[in-house]
Image (cartoon, grey):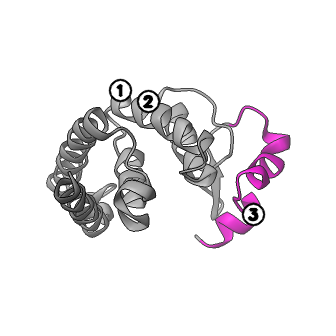
Amino acid sequence: MTHDVAALAVELTDMAAADHRTAVHANSDDPAEQLAWRWLTARHGDRLGEIMAEYGWPTAELVGEESARAAWLIAQHADRQLDVQRRALQLMQQAVSAGVAGPRELAFLRDRTLVNEGRQQVYGTQIAGVKDGAPVPWPCEEPERVDELRATVGIEPFDEYVARFS
């Protein structure tokens, strides 16, 4: 088992590295680049589904900090695989409750999943577009409480967050 877990940790970080390398193509004007991105994230989503079926959520305790973050990134980018995102959200929620995963990453995944379901997000982490040079979030359930809710999970206020992108 220990060998399997070590191999899993490496596999997850390799997947995240490939994700980082190709993420620039997510919104490319070139359909071939966009397709390559979609193919990669779909393949990674499928694999994460298998990993979750076998190990549950890959926590830092199990695979190490970097690989656990890699698993979260893969779930975050499995946008066309709602079943995978929902399962990751469920398992990650249990891991956060058990104190072995972070509420910040969970908040990002919750928002991402809600937006992918066509629902309003909670924490304002997902950006719909840019208007007059400023990032605009997808609609939020309680827009007036976004910064308060963000603070509860360790996410900086919305204005500080978007300032990093401008």
Q: Amino acid at mark 1?
A: Asp
Q: What's the distance in space between the residues labelled 3 and 1, CA to CA? A: 32 Å
What range is drawn magenta here? 140-164
Q: Are marks 2 and 1 in contact (CB under 8 Å)?
A: yes
For disc 3, the neighbor class at 10 Å (few under 14, some 14 to 19, many from 20) is few
The residue pinned by badge 1 equals 83
The residue pinned by badge 3 equals 159
Dot 2: element: helix
Q: Position of residue 96 (x, y in %)?
A: 58, 44
Q: Amino acid at mark 2?
A: Arg
Query: Which disc is residue 86 wearing?
Result: 2
Q: Amino acid at mark 3?
A: Asp
| Residue 30 in sight from this viewpoint | yes
Determine whether 67 is above or below 36 in the image.
Answer: below
Looking at the rendered image, the quarter that the C terminus falls into is: bottom right
Q: What's the distance in space between the residues labelled 3 and 2, CA to CA? A: 28 Å
Dot 1: element: helix
Q: Decide if residue 11 is on the left or right side of residue 150.
A: left
